[in-house]
Image: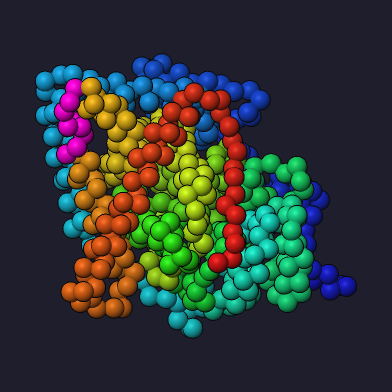
């Protein structure tokens, strides 16, 4: 607080010199000088010296984002070509059966894995030596929800001297600045950053600008509509005692799940995501960040160069870079971070398109490093399995359906699709059951949960429309780095 009791507002333009001094140099290239990367030429390039590859990995980390359009077109043509080719050859069905058998083995590993035990929350005695935490929130026109989040984050059951809250007001034009100024008078740990109207980088740019001003050993990121439990930090911090733990994602749940079909579907989707997160980590696979409720070790974030301002999903991008840098991402099931689900089909379409495009971007950007860097075979097997399940198979459904219509036969990928749909339904069922771990389920509850899982599976079918659309759009349009925020109503 200032001498005149003014709220602790930082003008980001006055702190640009500080940001440049503290923040490591970005690795990505300037958009004004695009360097298109021919996927076919890259695939056929000669092997380079391992030391040269490591130097390229460190100095040219984001070069892979060049040529996304060509890469997406190459992937789309490859998927279509292979799908049509499998329909035309006599032994195509046997290839699909073989692929299904291999994926079945991976599915069995997932289902039978025992989730890692979560360390107990910090006791009162341990708080004296607990690490410091900096919480970050990027807000733009969030008057409906920002007050509730700040009140919750400033009343966590954690020593006030050991954590602070930084809210980046990204040039809000509603009552968000007024609400923040009032809250800053009440909470000394609240710091406010103002961004000008012409600030670039979206959410990633906002986080990169505030990060050099923070001092926490652990950095937490929340969306403005988040709802948190008072004991959240006590539960998250113990996971970072493992030296290899670079980040932790808290399970997300939908606060307005009971509102309508769309919010109920999103609740099922979050349960599915939480289940797979735990199972994938249990078999040595990939834990993933989800933006809201993510915590990152400061040293890991610095080593990875901060948040990538050249992507529309900073959390998915950071996930890949952390794993490429040999960090582990953990998962906290309880307590969950609640968020507001979108309430209509139009909003869901825009949000899921952004998620789908961001998911594709990370693989198109870093495919060379994923293939060549020593991540370990468990992580690579897990990653390729989920690329197949989440991206390739839905995209292949379009040419598969087309060939089915022309040749009057069943879709050639039907065995693999059936297995993946069953696995998804299984994940929803068990994900919801884990979230209700304190309740014993009777026969009636089991049937009810099964019906809920089937409805959730029906909702999940929208991905079979979104992902082919995203892949096609990325293949034919120029690169566009535009982030469209989700409007929060404060339900």
Task: Give the residue furthest to the bottom.
Answer: 124
Q: Nearer the viewer, residue 127 or 171?
A: 171
Dominant secondary-structure state across the stretch colored magenta: loop
> Which residue is at 42% across, 76% downward?
121
Q: Is residue 32 left or right of residue 27?
A: right
| Residue 236 appears in view | yes
Q: Is residue 290 left or right of residue 430?
A: right
Magenta residues span 407-415
Colour scheme: rainbow
Depicted 333 relative to depicted 33: above or below: below
Q: How far across and down, in percent of the image, does residue 165 sit? A: 64, 66
Image quarter in which the C terminus is found:
bottom right
- Across and down, in percent, residue 167 comes to 67, 61
Q: Position of residue 275 (x, y in %)?
A: 31, 59
- Decide if residue 154 is in sight here: no
Q: Which image quarter: residue 305?
A: top right
């Amino acid at each position: 607080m200032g001498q005149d009791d003014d709220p602790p507002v930082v003008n980001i333009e006055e702190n640009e010199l500080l940001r440049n001094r503290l923040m490591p140099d970005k690795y990505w290239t300037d958009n004004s000088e695009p360097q298109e990367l021919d996927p076919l030429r890259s695939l056929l390039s000669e092997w380079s010296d391992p030391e040269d590859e490591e130097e390229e990995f460190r100095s040219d980390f984001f070069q892979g984002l060049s040529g996304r359009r060509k890469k997406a077109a190459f992937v789309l043509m490859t998927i279509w070509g292979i799908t049509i080719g499998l329909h035309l050859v006599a032994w195509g069905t046997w290839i699909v059966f073989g692929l299904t058998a291999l994926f079945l083995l991976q599915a069995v590993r997932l289902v039978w894995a025992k989730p890692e035990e979560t360390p107990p929350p910090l006791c009162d005695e341990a708080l004296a030596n607990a690490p410091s935490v900096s919480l970050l929130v990027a807000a733009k026109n969030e008057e409906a929800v920002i007050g509730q989040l700040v009140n919750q984050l400033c009343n966590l059951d954690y020593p006030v001297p050991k954590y602070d809250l930084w809210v980046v007001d990204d040039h809000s034009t509603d009552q968000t600045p007024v609400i923040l100024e009032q809250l800053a008078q009440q909470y000394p740990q609240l710091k406010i950053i103002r961004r000008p109207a012409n600030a670039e980088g979206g959410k990633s740019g906002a986080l990169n600008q505030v990060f050099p001003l923070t001092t926490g050993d652990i950095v937490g990121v929340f969306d403005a509509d988040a709802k948190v439990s008072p004991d959240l930090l006590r539960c998250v911090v113990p996971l970072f005692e493992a030296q290899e733990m670079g980040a932790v994602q808290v399970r997300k749940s939908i606060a307005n799940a009971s509102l309508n079909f769309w919010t109920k579907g999103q609740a099922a989707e979050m349960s599915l995501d939480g289940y797979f997160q735990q199972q994938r980590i249990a078999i040595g696979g990939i834990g993933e960040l989800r933006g809201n409720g993510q915590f990152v070790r400061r040293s890991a974030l610095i080593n990875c160069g901060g948040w990538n301002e050249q992507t529309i999903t900073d959390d998915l991008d950071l996930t890949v870079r952390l794993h490429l840098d040999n960090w582990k991402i953990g998962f906290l099931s309880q307590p969950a971070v609640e968020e507001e689900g979108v309430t209509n089909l139009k909003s869901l379409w825009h949000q899921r398109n952004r998620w789908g495009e961001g998911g594709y971007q990370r693989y198109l950007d870093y495919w060379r490093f994923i293939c060549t860097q020593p991540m370990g075979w468990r992580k690579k097997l897990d990653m390729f399995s989920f690329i197949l399940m989440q991206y390739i198979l839905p995209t292949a459904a379009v040419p598969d359906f087309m060939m089915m219509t022309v040749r009057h036969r069943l879709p050639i990928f039907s065995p693999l699709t059936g297995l993946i749909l069953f696995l998804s339904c299984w994940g929803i069922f068990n994900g919801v059951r884990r979230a209700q771990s304190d309740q014993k389920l009777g026969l009636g509850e089991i049937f009810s949960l099964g019906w809920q899982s089937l409805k959730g599976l029906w909702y999940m079918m929208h991905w079979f429309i979104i992902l082919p659309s995203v892949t096609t759009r990325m293949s034919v349009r120029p690169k566009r780095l535009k982030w469209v925020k989700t409007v929060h109503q404060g339900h």
